[in-house]
Image (tube, rainbow, N blue to C red):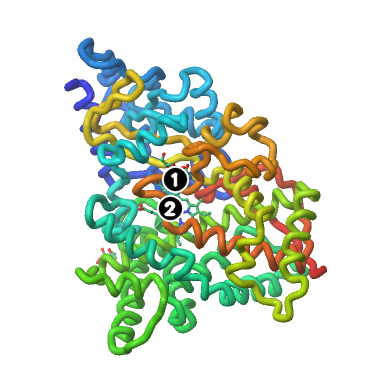
Amino acid sequence: MSKHKNELALCAILFLTPTYTTLHLSTPSTTNVMAFHFIFCLFAPILFVPLFPYLRNLFKSNRRRPPLPPGTLGWPYIGETFHLYSKNPNIFFASKQQRYGSIFKTHILGCPCVMISSPEAAKFVLLTKSHVFHPAFPASKERMLGKQAIFFSRGQYHAKLRKLVLRAFMPHAFKSYIPNFESIAQHFLHSSEGILVTTFHEMKTYTFNVALLSIFGKDRVVYSEDLKRWYYVLEKGYNSMPIDLPGTLFNKSMKARKEIARIVEKIMSTRRKMKADWNDLLESFMSDEEGLTDEQITDNIIGVIFAARDTTASVLTWIIKYLEENPGVLQAVTEEQEAIMRGKEEQKLSWEDTKKMPITSRVIQETLRVASILSFTFREAIEDVEYDGYLIPKGWKVLPLFRNIHHSPDIFPDPEKFDPSRFEVAPKPNTFMPFGNGTHSCPGNELAKLEMMVLLHHLTTKYRWHVVGSNSGIQYDPFAVPQNGLPIRLFRK
Ligand code: HEM
Ligand SMILES: *[C@@H]1O[C@H](CO)[C@@H](O)[C@H](O)[C@H]1NC(C)=O
Ligand SMILES: *[C@@H]1O[C@H](CO)[C@@H](O)[C@H](O)[C@H]1NC(C)=O
């Protein structure tokens, strides 16, 4: 196994070296870049090619151990990254799966990895053996998002953060925010009337406001402009080269981080002097008995904005596209939403109303399935693990491919078809995981669904819209979104 060790040492160097290519492979019009949630590390492995020609024969398996999964590891060191970039990543995964089955090895992002695409294997990695499959991210990314953010953390510290985040993001906690969500939604729909707007852009504004509200509660009003301004600077650096010289994107990003930290500290120090209930994420973080440090709080606030905003905005954009393409479905959603308003004196949504939206819920589920904006997630084996007769060696990355599972014809017949009625029957465990599963699954999923419902309620009852221009392409931004962010025109009904 010492062969693996060489390989892994190199992988470690790459993973820890702050050298990843900009996703500007992913300028908005490119379609051949991967989209993933917290995975941001598209390295420039080609730079390293001359160093590692000897790595070619690394993968003859040792007789006493189970074999490695099938698959090819591509050229030494470039791995299969090129193949991945040169095609739509989903086609890459699907063709591999066709050839090798639901578990195969490959070599991307400079690291040997095992991709898995069956519900059983996903359960094995994310739940049954989650203690040996840890989240793994490049160090430079951790620095920008915050080293102590929930995604990167493990063990007790992770459990504590999760408890605090879940407490703030459980329905009973944010129920009272529905009127605020409504006014944010109505305000932005109103301001988009008649003009040509980019759906994704508008949706990001909406989800940003909702995220700030759920983090900072009332304090959002005072600080949101500053927070937004600095967050925009910060995110420009997410996919930049981490070179810390004055004037670089990375340096500006790190500076923006400090500014955000300053604002958060200011809010906290004001709150410490007052006695009140805020009922938001910051309060949950501040009330921890053992105490989180200010730095831990800031890292996690930035992390939550990152996790909450573009994901939800991209799903909403897909919903708007699919509704326009499927007039029958749009009609059914509209009728369901109109029925909720009928006979009401006050035109306000309540928590109970959101329980009366089965058709709308299925549209959301089906969109999460078809669009699968998080194609996969990322783990690392911390010891040798055997699965299904194959060895997953210590140090290898393991990628559960959500998208492949969601597009498997055995699980979802005619998988490319948008058909919300397929969710009239609940999907089997671990066949539908848009929010992951297990210890790191999405704690924001209830909030995400609620904010989508509120927006769809006002959109379908008061507006009609049409998509402008051709709309068949996909771009990765970094999540999958319709080409050009789906330009539309909205009209009041
Ligand atoms: C439709 C929108 C969303 C989708 C599809 C989504 C999906 C996911 C997925 C798949 C994971 C698990 C990643 C993994 O296992 O490696 C995750 C984690 C996470 N999500 Fe979401 N998410 C969405 C919205 C949100 C929102 C609105 C919030 C916050 C308000 C949020 C906060 C988080 C956090 C904090 C984690 C990390 C949890 C941990 O590591 O323990 N997400 N999300
Ligand atoms: C940006 O670069 C300057 C000059 O090298 C350095 O002093 C500063 O610490 C850097 N900023 C951050 C936030 O790293
Ligand atoms: C997560 O895993 C558990 C245990 O296998 C299962 O009962 C549950 O349905 C899974 N959740 C999803 C969303 O598939």
Q: Residue furthest top?
A: 63
Mark 2 Cα within 10 Å, few/some/many (few <14, many 20+)?
some
- Residue 278, image x and y in percent? 40, 80
Q: Does the CB distance between marks 2 and 1 fall below 8 Å?
A: yes
Residue for point 48% across, 47% down: 24
Is residue 398 or residue 263 the one in the foreground? Answer: 398
**Tag of residue 436:** 1
Residue type at numbered disc 2: Cys
**Position of the C terminus by quadrant:** bottom right
What quarter of the picture does the N terminus occupy? top left
Front-lying residue, 81 or 137: 137
What is the distance, in whole Å, between disc 2 and disc 1 at their CAs? 6 Å
Label 1 CB sits under 8 Å from any ligand 1 atom? yes
Task: Tell me the SS state at disc 1.
Answer: loop
Q: Name which residue lies at 57% across and 67% down.
A: 205
Label 1: how many Cα within 10 Å (few below 14, some 14–19, many 20+): many
Q: With 429 as the anchor, is 195 left or right in this view?
A: right
Mark 2 residue's CB less than 8 Å from ligand 1: yes
Q: Secondary structure at mark 2?
A: loop
- Viewer-proximal residue among 42 and 290: 290
What residue type is disc 1 on? Answer: Gly
Answer above or below: position of 410 versus 226: above
Residue 9 in picture, x, y percent from top left: 21, 32
Residue 30 showing in the rendered view: no
Q: Which residue is mark 2?
A: 442
